[in-house]
Each structure stands twice: as structure tokens, then as C-alpha cells.
Amino acid sequence: MKDNPKLNRDPGHAVKKKVTSFLTNNMVTIMFVVLSLLAFQVSGMNSNLYITDIVSRISRNSFTVLALIIPVIAGMGLNFSIIVGAMAAQAVIIYVTHWGVPGFAGIMLCVALVTPLSILLGYLTGHLFNRVKGQEMITGLIFGYFAMGIYTFIFLQLVGGVLPMDNEVLVLSSGVGIRTTIDLYGGLRYGLDDLFRLPLPVMLIIAGLIAAGYQLFIFMRSDRLKAQRFNMIIGIAGSLLVVVLAIVLMNSNSLIRLISIPVATWLAIIALCFFLFFFTKTKLGQDMRSVGQDRHIAAVSGINVDRVRVIAIIMSTVLASWGHIIFLQNMGAWSTYGSHMQIGFYAIAAILIGGATVTRATIGQALLGVFLFHTLFIVAPAAGRELFGDAQIGEYFRVFVAFGVIGVTLAMHAWKTKLQSNQGIRAIKDE
Amino acid sequence: MQNIFKDFVRNFGIPRLIILGFFLLLCVMAVFLGLDFAELMSSSLVRIGMNGILVLAILPSIVCGTGPNFGLSLGILCGLLGGLIAMELTLNGFTNFFAAIAFSIPLSVLVGYGYGLLLNKVKGSEMMFAIFVGWSVVSVMKIGWLVLPFNSPEMAWPIGRGVRVTIALLNREVSQLLNNLWAFNVGGVIIPTGLLLFFVICCFILWLFMRSKTGMAMYAAGDNPRFARAAGINVDRQRIIGTIVSTFIGAVGILVYAQSFGFYQLYDGPMMMPFIAIAAILIGGASIRKASITNVIVGTFLFFGILVVAMPVANAFAADIASMAEITRQIIQNGIILYALMQAGKGDAA
Amino acid sequence: MAEYLLEMDNICKSYYGTKVLTDVKLALKPGEIHAIIGENGAGKSTLMNILFGMPVIHSTGGCEGEIFIDGQPVEIKSPLQAMDLGIGMVHQEFMLLPNYTVTENIKLNRETRKENLVSRLFGKNLETLDYKSMNADARKALDSLDIGIEEYTRVAGLPVGYMQFTEIAREIDKSNTRMMVFDEPTAVLTESEASNLLDAMRKIAERGIAILFITHRLDEVMEVADYITVLRDGRLVGTMRKEDATIYGLAELMVGRKVEKLFNRKSRVNFEDVAVRIKNLTVNMPGERVRGLTLDVYRGEIFGIGGLAGQGKIGVANGVMGLYPSQGSVVINNDDLTLNDPRESMKRGMAFLSEDRRGVGLLLDSSVELNIVITTMQNKGLFMKKLGPLTQIDGSKVREHSQKLIKDLDIRCTGPTQPVKRLSGGNQQKVCIARALTLKPDILFVSEPTRGIDIGAKQRVLETLLRLNEEMGMTIIITSSELAELRSICDRIAIVSGGKVAGILQPDASDVDFGLLMAGQIDRKGA
């Protein structure tokens, strides 16, 4: 077990070791970067179209993916039950649409209504998870399907019948059940996005200036080491470069300059990132980290493990429901009995592609994952058409990728856990 | 007396009692609504026969210790491939059916072996892993259906590439093959003798297998791996054998299902099928670690009985019949799996 | 202010009808180091569990007797309450989170916090952690132990000794700690780490904190303790000042018991003929590691292996039978044995009754008859018949064989088809014996044959083993934590300490000899 001093003295070896460990630890992400680049090359896609699409996909999907982080911290793995939060959001949106509250007011009403509902559902899910400790992921998955049955039952069989709803647009012609697609056009559509929009270059300039200013502020105040100073100077330079590029872009005739950014949505995502960052530094966040590392030790030191776990799931469910509202108001038309279905899998696949694991997930991984996963989503059909003459193949491929990456991550996690216990034995042998 | 009753409730489990009660209620309502009982019986029997073997396929995986086989879609895909090969060779009737089974043997042995190796690497989280292996392979096969060289006109799309989403078996005289074999009518109830007989024979063969030396070793490996190791049994090997057997029975199961249904369902078809089969065996009284052939038979009878009877009864009440049956299935199926997970969780806590 | 910080009076505790503590007393003054010594199963851990209010005590019906703190009677219902009362525990298995820094571990769930805007709105749980002050506190606690660990290093990867100090620092940092329990703290430490620890204990005691020191290392007791309490079989057998104690006296007190020669047996040992020759055997059995053990067992012998828990005695049989990874040489009947292969071990005429009867020894849900025959069926292909290409279990042969053994061994069951989980511990053990006999072994390894079995049944199990030895000339190697049991039927007894044979004694050797061997004294001093 002791480090071989010879190896440590050899700097070349140390670098090599670092590189190898970087490669193995980020295998999934690196594979994806390569895959996405290749697919992008092959697809011959117009980069204007791509950028327009990816920007809107990032703004509508990030919030939900970020909702996965807290349960991972609390040691409950990937929360497959965020689909329950998504269904809560859909239920609320159906009613708000029925009442005809449009735009931003409607969105706020949705948030106000969905929050208590998701707290309740998260509370139930959390208690369920406390009865199956160690099996949270599969339980969450099955619970999602179970809840889907109930959701479908309520909105297909009860609403309009037992639960009266008089609305020709929403309700099926038979008078019972909500139609299979709902269009939010003229209602909640872009309720948040349209609150405040800025062109991409302007947004970039503002963001770049803020970043540069912030780093300058820190730089002036602190007396850090040289290396860090160097990093900061690079950071400031980079931020300013973004500003310059944005100004260039603004004066070009590229279509990208016309992309308008839904500032309110982006602010919501940024606010969530800040909150998550802040949260890990709080007492409750620390308790979650403790519980996540070892339930037994946490309990012995007086942390109410079950309660902390329930809170983690409630938070995740609430965030997921908000995230789904953001998603749907951007989509506009959505399928009543299907939109929630893939939400959990795609969000989880995204965060895993960003490099997260069952036991570790960060904000950066979530955002990187959304970017990579949706890049593949955009380019796969076109790549499939170019390569095999069939866009369908690309579409099937991206579904395979979503499931495959989850499967691989789970396998690696199980395998690593097994390996670690074996290593424990070997370590003792070597002593 | 009361104790016996309590014991029974505890062993049987409240959810199963609810399901049984629900089934009885449906039957009573069916009578009350004046539904055609003979017809209900007939279609129940068909549903039991056509699904039974898929449910049976879950048994070896639970017995050998890898847990309910959520990756049964692998076996189903092997069966479908075998079926498509038989079809490509323009075989008819029983030749087609048995050739399909024969073709799926090497496939399922190979696939089951590889899958078993993987399952041995992820001991302790087999179920979750199996779900995603199953789904990944179903998605890969969706590409496979597009690119595999099946050209027979009954299968290929007239334009474009790949095979159809559903492939009719009627032209190959495979449709209803077993259902109609020696079928007879008793008071309006049609007994699909061939179908039921095939199911019973499969159960019997598996029963014999479980009593063989390998079967006993597999049982010991699943029941208590540490005991098995001390008894000189290679636990990993037994788990692989169990996985292969499960995969193969799954392949046979889908072929029997398809001949009764009249179509091969490709693409998304096999995706959720393992969940249905697992729910059935759990309803029959199996747990995540223990199962018997009785569980298979009872579970198949109850689960598919409910689904058959629920349809016409729902017709009288619900707005949308087709979806009502689907909803019932979804709630019962996932409810019973959740219950089984919670029971297993209890065991771990103790 | 009362004279004693802690008094425990007439403590009694039973688990499922078995008394594990009877009228135990303990008194502790501030600043005193009080050692509690005793064999495994003497009741040390149970006593500490009671003091710490562990759930295991309350879930099994609580305990009798009274506990006073500062002369006030208290009832300790949970570990949290114990902590509130100022009782600190340094656990044998570390209660440390590996991904946290030393500071975070010291301050676990006692983090210093600062108010912020969010916490003012949403409650104290969202207050931010004040790492600066936490680090300062941690530094102070570590300094008071003279330990130079940096408070901001992560615990994962620290040497074991430092982990232990982190735990101790946590207890010191709790401002109300007045009493600390050290549960076998030196078991995992190297010699120098252990001596650092003893120094730290003295320093803590100087601050007026009382220490309960649980151990079986007598030399450490003599080095630091002020008072010594000896427990044996759940009873108090002596309390003395260190000045009045000697290592020999303590060893005798710890082990001593009247040895009843339960059985009269003629030894049929052939000291010319070695049945099992173990040379330099290493077994990787977690918690019971064997480290280069050498041993000869003669044909027809009943050979005992004793020693304290964790010293490796259990690992010997498990290693020879191939259940845990092993290295070294084992010669059975003058032929080398291929290690790490249970089938091979059984083929060579050995059988094994595991110490973990319910975990390794039985298929609990299966019938008595299946449990009896399955090992033989799998290894020798007996009890099978042919049915075309398939082999089938031969029901009638199985039935016949199991009925015979049920009668021979007097297994109390409703019949051969009863599931073994419904049998009592003694009868389950007999089913295990029946299974071993079905293999027709000439060497039988038996681990903890009477653990969890009531007294009457114990006797019968031992009698059965004796009969097998006398009537069939079987060589039997018994591993047991109960020395008295070994002394009552064995021809020779090896005491295993530190994964090696510390010495081989005759059953009628003196208590002092056994005690010293078990406490590892002789081995350590190189005698």
C-alpha cells in the first residue's frame, strides 16, 4: 500500500499517472465530446441552426437537470422519481390553462400551486425511499411508473367526469378526459421566456463584463499566491475576450447575433446554481453530505437521517416541478400523457454524460452534461441520415445512448464498490 | 383460527389480498352486468396460455439469485430474431414455429452467457442494471431492425428500409397455431388445449430441471451463496446458467405469445414486457429472492384474469376502455413491484 | 458534589432469556483511568452499550440496575442522551467520514454556524458553516493531545493512529465531556501508536476527565490504569487498585473457572501419524486473519483451537476448507492439499461445520433432508438417478438416508421435510453434523459448535462429537471461544494469538497459562 518513493520522484511518471486517472475518471464525458464532435462533422449541420437550437435546449432543460444534484449529495443516488415532480407541474398547468391565466402571471400562479403539491409528493416519495434504503433508484423508477398510472387515471378518466371541467378546448369531445396534446399558445407559452429578452451578443457582453468585474474585485482585494494571480489574470482576459467577440458578432451579419436570450429563464437557472452552491455550505447541506457518506455514522452523531433524506427528496421534487414548468412554457404544445415520460431518463443521462456518478454530482457536470447530451440530440438524426441514409437511425441511436449511459454508469458504480471492498482485503493482506 | 388467518394475511401480503379481492369484485360485477361469462373464460384462458411462458422465464433468474429478470427483453429479442429468420426462410406452420425456437437457442445461449457475465460483475444491483441493459439493447435492436438483411415482403416495408413495426403471422400459418390445436368447446367456453398444454409442458420441463443436480446447485447458489460456496458449488457459474435458461424461456415465451397474438411486435414492443411478467410472478406470491412454479401459475392466472375481466367491466363505467385496461395494468403492475421492493428492504433492515 | 462521577449498581441484562450481565458494579471518579478487562463474551461491550444507551439494549427489553451520574440517578435511553450527560465514546470501528477533513469530522453535527440572509428567512438549518472558527477549535483539541495532524487534511488516507486521535479530539472538543470510553483502542494500532495513545489518555485524565478503558492487553492495563475491574461470564470477579494487581493475577481472574471434566474418554491418539500438517498458513478472512500459522494434528485426536476473538482462530478451518483466500502449505494424510478449492478439500475427506451456522451452514428455508444431502449430492453425485438425459434427485434414497440420521443423531423435528429454520439451534447444529457425516469424512472441522445453543443441547452436541471420534476414529478439530468447552473434551489445545499459534497446552494446564497465552503476553515478551 505504501507509495513507491521511486515512482514519486519521477515527474514524468506522475504526470502520466495524472493523465491516466483524468482519462479514466472522465471516460464517459470524453467519449461524448469525441462522439458529439464526430457526429457534428458527419451531420454537416449548419452551425447557426445548431447554436440556435442548443441555446434554447440549454435554457429549457438545465433547471430540471440541476434538480438531480441534491439527492446525490444525500447519498440517495440518481433521483428517478423527479418524473413525479414533472407530473405535478403538468397537473397544475392543465388547471391554470383551464382558468385562462396567461403569461407571467400564469407562470407565477403555477409555481405557487405546484410548490405545495410537490412538497406533499416529495414527502411521500421520501418516506417510501426511507423504507427501501439502498434501493432508492429502482424504487424511484418504478414509483414513477406507478404515479404515471394514477396521473393518467385522474386526467383521462376523472377530469370532466367525477371532477367536472367545462372546457371544450382541453377536454375530449366525449366530455371526460383531457385531450392528448395541450397547446399553451396564447396562454402560458413563453410566460417566463418572454418576460425579458436580450440578443445573444448583448447578453454575452453583459455576462463578460460582470465576470471580469467580479474577478477584478477579488483580485484587488486579495493577496493570493502567484499561480492564482496568473489564473485570475487569464480569467479576466478571457472574460474580456468574450466581450470583444460579442461586439464583433454584433456587427457581423451572422444569424447567431439574432438569437434572443430569455433572460428571466437564464436568471432562474443562475439563481438555482447560486442556491445550490450556497446550500452545500449550510448546516443542512453539511448534514446531507454527512448522511450521504455514511448513514450509520451520521445517525450516531445525532443527525436525523430519515428527515434529512426526506428533505432532500422534497427539494428535488419541487425543483423538478419548477424545471418542468420552464420546460413546458418553452415547448408550448406538449403531450398530456407522454411529456413527463422521458424527462427523468434524459435528465439523468445528461448529468451522467457531464461526468456525474451515483455518488457525486456537481453544478458544472450538470451544465456540461446538458450541453453535450443535447448536442448529440440535435446532430444525431442528421448524422444518421448522412451516414446511413436514414434519420431514424440517428434518433434510435440517441435513445440508446440515454439508456446505455445510465446502464454503464450503474455498472461502473456497482463494479467499483465491489472492487473497493476487494481492495480493502488486499490492503490488509499487504500490511 | 384467528392466528391462522393472520399468518395467512402476513404471508400472502395485503397487496395480494387487495388484488385477489379486486379480481373477485370484477367477477361479481361481470355477472351483475350480465356479461358473457363463457367468452370471458375463453379469453382468460388464451391470455394465461400466451403469457404464462414469459412469466415462467422470470423463475430461473429469481432462483439462481440474480433477482427478477428485468432484462428479459434480451430473451424476447432472441425469440423475435429466431422468428424472423424462420419467416425469411418462408417456413410454414409448425415447421416455422419450431424452427424459430431452434434458431433462438444458440442466440439465447450466447446472449444469456454474456448477460450473465455482466450480472456477476454487478452483484447487489442486478435489477437496476438489468432494466437499463434491457432498454439499451431494445434501442440498439431498433437500429438492428432497420439494417438487418430481412427482405421477405411480409416483413420489409414496401418503401424505405428495415422491417415493419408489426409483422403478421397469418400468411405463414403460424397465427393461432397452438391456440387452435385440439381446441374444443365446453358450454361456450373454448379451451385452447394446445396452448395450455404447451405451457404445462414447459412448466413440467423446468420442474424436472430444478430437480436435477444442476437445478439443485442453482437453487442453493441463489438461496444462500455462501452456503453454496462451502458446498463446493461455483456460484457465478450457476448464476450464468440461470440467466441463460431465463433468456431461452423468454425467447420461447415471445414466440408462443406472438402466435396467439398473430403478430410479431418489434421496435418498442419488447421494452416493458419484462415488467409485466415480473408483476405476474410477484402477484403469484413470489418475492425478489424466492419463487416457485406455483407462483408462476397462480400469478399468471390472477394478473391476466384481472386484465381480461377488467376490460368489459370498465366498458360499463369508464369513458375510455382501452386506456382503462392499460391504466389498471400500470397501477397493479408497478404497485406490486414496489411492494416487493419494500418487502426486500424490510429484510435488509433486520 | 458526589465523590463518584459515575456509579453503576447491580446491573443485570439478559438477551432472549440468556443472562449476560449479573449484578455488575462500577464506580468511577473524575480524572481516573479505570480499566475493564475480560474475555470475549465476559460482558464488557454489553456494559458499555448500557452506559451509552445503545438501541440494541432497548430493543431487547432494557436492563435492570441503577446508574448514577454525580450521585443523581439517570436513565440513559439513547446515545444522544449519553452525549448530553458528558459521556464520550471512542469507537473500535472509527466513526469518521473519509471524505471530510479532520475538522469536519471533529465538528460532525456540532458545526459552528453564522447567520445569513437566507437563514433569517428560512430558519437555522440554512445558516452557513463558520470554517474559520471550526478549524480553530479543532486545532485546539488536537494541540491538547500534542498531535501534529493538520486540521484541514482529509481523513481518507490518514494512518490508522491519526484517525483514532481525530476521534479522541472530537470527544475533547465537546465542552461537556467528562468521561470517555475507549473500547479496545489499541487493537488496530502499531506499537508506537499505541504508546502515543496511552500518553494521550494520561493527558486527558489530568484534565479531570475520567476514562473507562476496555481492553484485553494486560501490560497496557498495568501501564496506565488506576483501577482495574475484571469481568467473567457477565459477573464481576474483582475490582482492585493497580498497585494490588499483577499480570498473573489478572490473567487467572480473567480465565479462571472450575474445569469440569465432563467426559471420560480414552485417548486414541496415534502420535506417530499426522492427519493434518499446516505450515505457514495465511488466511485472508476479514476480522479473523491467520498470519503464518503452523500446526500438526494427529490421527484420532480431538484438537482444540482457542483464543480471543479477532486473533485468527476462526480463520484456520475456513482457510483449510477453501472458503477464504489462503496461502501456505497444508498436508492431509501425507499429501499436499490444493488450497482455495472447497471441492478439493471435501474430496480429500474433510468436512466442516461453520461458525456461521445460519449464514454458511444451512439453507434455512429448505427441508431437513435437502440440507443433509445437498453437499454430498453436489460433490459425489450420490442421491441422484438418471431420467433420460437428465439427472433427477432420488427422493426415496434421500428420505431413507435422512430418516436414519435423524434417528441416529436424535434430531428433533416433525419430519425430514420440515424447513430447518423452524428447528432450535441445537437441532440445526445436528442437521449440520448430519450433512458433514453424509460426506463420510475422516477429518472434521468444527467451529463454535455450541454458539447460540442452550445448555442442555450443548452437552448433546459435544457428546455427539465425542462419539464420532471414539466410534469412527474421526479426527476432530474444534475451534471455540469457550475455553471450558475445549478443556472438557480436547486432547490438546492450541491458543491462537495474532494469527499464529501462541502455544499448545494440555487441557489440564493452569488457568494462568491459558490466560497469559490468550492475552498475548508470552508471545509479546518473546518467551
Image: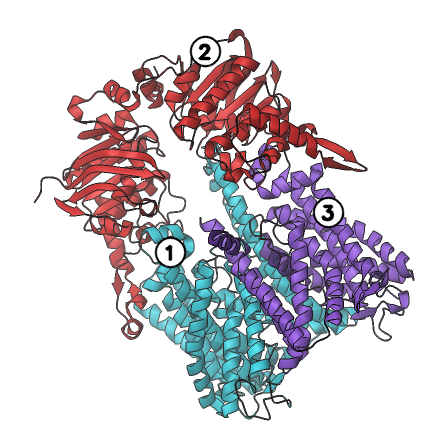
Chain colours: A cyan, B purple, C red
Q: Marks 1 and 2: which is nearer the front?
A: 2
Q: Are marks 3 and 2 in contact (CB under 8 Å)?
A: no
- In the rendering, at what x and y percent does residue B114 appear? 70, 49
Q: Residue at x 86, y 63 (%)?
A: B174
Distance (Cα) linking label 3 and label 2: 52 Å
Mark count: 3
**Which residue is label 2 attached to?**
C265
- Of B221 and A319, nearer the camera is B221
Mark 2 chain:
C
- In the rendering, at what x and y percent does residue A333 appear? 60, 85
Is residue C200 among the parts visible in the rendering? Answer: no
Q: Residues within 10 Å of mark 2 (few under 14, many from 20)?
A: few
Task: Using the image, tell me which numbered label, if any, was put on residue B206.
Answer: 3
Q: Residue at x 47, y 88 (%)?
A: A106
> Residue C335 falls in which quadrant of the image?
top right
Q: Residue at x 43, y 14 (%)?
A: C492
Q: What amino acid is at disc 2?
A: Arg
Mark 3 chain:
B
**Which residue is label 1 attached to?**
A290
Residue C196 placement, left or right of B333: left
Q: What amino acid is at disc 1?
A: Ser
Q: Residues within 10 Å of mark 3 (few under 14, many from 20)?
A: many
